[in-house]
Image (tube, rainbow, N blue to C red):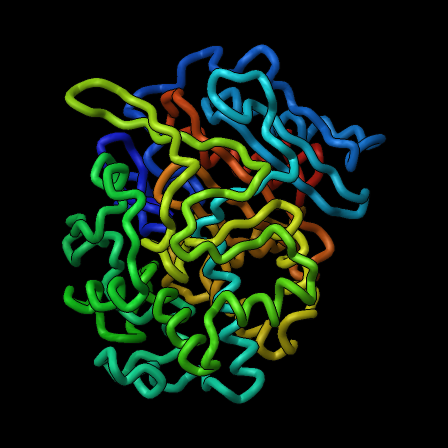
């Protein structure tokens, strides 16, 4: 979920350059300066505020893990945990620069590449209905694009197609090849531009493939923009309509949106910011409003921690897919990047060790300002969903993996493991 730029990471659901491989995929794009986080960044009133939904639960390990993100320089955090003790909902930090209000615990946010898990689920539902064959050539469904006929539907969901990532990619020797404006000041100046999915795909197809289909693994937004086009071609309906019919309405997900060219988050929401260098000066811009069509199918959706919990719990609890396809979804590719676990079909599978077990996850971020976290046990009984927002503080990139690991272990391994 990351890319490169003068301020550190950027570009949304993007594949990370070699220089930042130690960072988690959900790390906010464009929020990181080449400097260590300044001590005392957290405001005096930024201690975690627990909502009434968590009343009566004393979860100091969760408070501590959430506060660590704010202390390190993030502006705000929303966290929801559902486990054997019930539901814990809390927030920390600030809702907006210049105010003292905390982020709304039920706020909307750009979820970035969490979008991919929704798309993979709908594709697999169509496989279950016999409308799509998982190992059939994508070109047979979308002949107008001129795709390599060796690319199968499975390869799209698994990131093994070899297609160039239209938001930028690494070539064979590790050199970063820029794509459409998705990082730094260039993205900021173009953040309200509208893109059509076909436009994104055709741009990617104008670039050389990274490898022959099925021979390697590389995270590419192009795969999931194609997945959206595939869903729409096979069903004859928009992805938005199919998602509402298949997932949103049955699960009561009232805060999840496929925005199209919509640039405004529904209320309530926390503000996210983009920190960048311009003419040698550091500047900060509110990027709560941005046009997510740059990441159609790959990272353009809006949701809430409540909705992500309900979706991921239902998916892993076997309520959205037949058992056979859920098993295939969780079959990790051996060549996929192991940082968040190995990649299956639209999600990562990570082994936290014998004391904690396996967690399934997909994190994400749009090009800047926001990040989403979504984790679950294989049976869906325990989930962690969260939103992080960036502010005006520099951020030490080396601290993020440790903080993320601490939060995940606080939920899935217990208080002692988190410590």
In the rendering, at what x and y percent does residue 338 appear? 42, 53
Q: Is residue 350 above or below residue 192?
A: below
Q: Which corner quadrant of the image does residue 199 belong to?
A: bottom left
Q: Which corner quadrant of the image does residue 320 belong to?
A: bottom right
In the rendering, at what x and y percent does residue 271 appear? 48, 31
Give whichever of 358, 285 is nearer the camera: 285
Q: Is residue 204 above or below residue 364?
A: below
The quadrant of the picture occupied by the C terminus is top right
Q: Which corner quadrant of the image does residue 326 belong to?
A: bottom right
Residue at 49% across, 58% down: 258
Left or right of 214 in this view: 400: right
Left or right of 368 in this view: 413: right
Residue at 61% across, 71% down: 246
Residue at 49% across, 25% down: 75
Q: Is residue 385 above or below residue 275?
A: below
- Whether residue 210 is visible to the viewer of this picture, yes or no, is no
- Number of numbered markers: 0
In the rendering, at what x and y percent does residue 311 appear? 63, 58
Residue at 46% across, 71% down: 238
In the rendering, at what x and y percent does residue 363 appear? 49, 49
- Whether residue 284 is visible to the viewer of this picture, yes or no, is yes
């Amino acid at each position: 979920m990351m890319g490169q730029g003068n301020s550190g990471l950027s570009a949304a659901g993007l594949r990370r350059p070699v220089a930042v491989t130690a960072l988690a995929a959900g790390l906010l794009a464009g929020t990181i300066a080449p400097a260590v986080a300044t001590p005392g960044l957290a405001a005096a009133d930024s201690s975690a505020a627990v909502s009434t939904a968590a009343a009566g639960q004393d979860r100091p390990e969760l408070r501590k893990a959430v506060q660590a993100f704010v202390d390190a320089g993030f502006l705000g955090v929303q966290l929801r945990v559902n486990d054997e003790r019930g539901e814990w909902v809390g927030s920390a930090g600030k809702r907006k620069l210049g105010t003292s209000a905390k982020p709304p615990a039920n706020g909307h946010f750009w979820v970035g590449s969490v979008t991919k898990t929704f798309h993979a689920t709908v594709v697999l539902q169509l496989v279950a209905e016999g409308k799509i064959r998982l190992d059939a050539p994508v070109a047979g469904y979308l002949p107008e694009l001129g795709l390599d006929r060796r690319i199968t539907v499975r390869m799209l969901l698994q990131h093994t197609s070899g297609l160039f990532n239209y938001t930028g990619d690494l070539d064979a020797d590790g050199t970063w090849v820029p794509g459409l404006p998705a990082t730094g000041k260039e993205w900021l100046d173009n953040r309200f531009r509208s893109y059509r999915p076909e436009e994104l795909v055709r741009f990617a197809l104008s670039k050389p493939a990274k490898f022959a289909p099925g021979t390697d693994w590389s995270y590419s937004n192009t795969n999931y923009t194609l997945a959206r086009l595939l869903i729409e071609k096979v069903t004859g309906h928009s992805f938005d309509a199919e998602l509402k019919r298949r997932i949103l309405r049955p699960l009561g997900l009232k805060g999840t949106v496929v925005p199209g060219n919509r640039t405004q988050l529904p209320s309530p929401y926390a503000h996210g910011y983009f920190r960048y260098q311009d003419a040698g000066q550091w500047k900060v811009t509110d990027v709560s409003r941005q046009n997510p069509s740059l990441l159609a199918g790959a990272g353009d959706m809006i949701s809430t921690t409540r909705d992500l919990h309900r979706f991921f719990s239902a998916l892993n609890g076997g309520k959205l897919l037949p058992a056979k396809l859920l098993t295939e979804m969780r079959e990790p590719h051996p060549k996929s990047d192991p940082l968040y676990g190995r990649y299956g079909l639209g999600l990562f599978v990570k082994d936290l060790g014998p004391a904690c077990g396996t967690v399934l996850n997909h994190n994400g971020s749009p090009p800047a300002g926001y990040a989403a976290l979504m984790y679950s046990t294989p049976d869906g009984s325990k989930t962690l969903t969260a939103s992080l927002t960036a502010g005006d503080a520099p951020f030490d990139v080396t601290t993020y993996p440790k903080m993320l690991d601490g939060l995940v272990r606080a939920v899935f391994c217990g208080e002692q493991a988190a410590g």
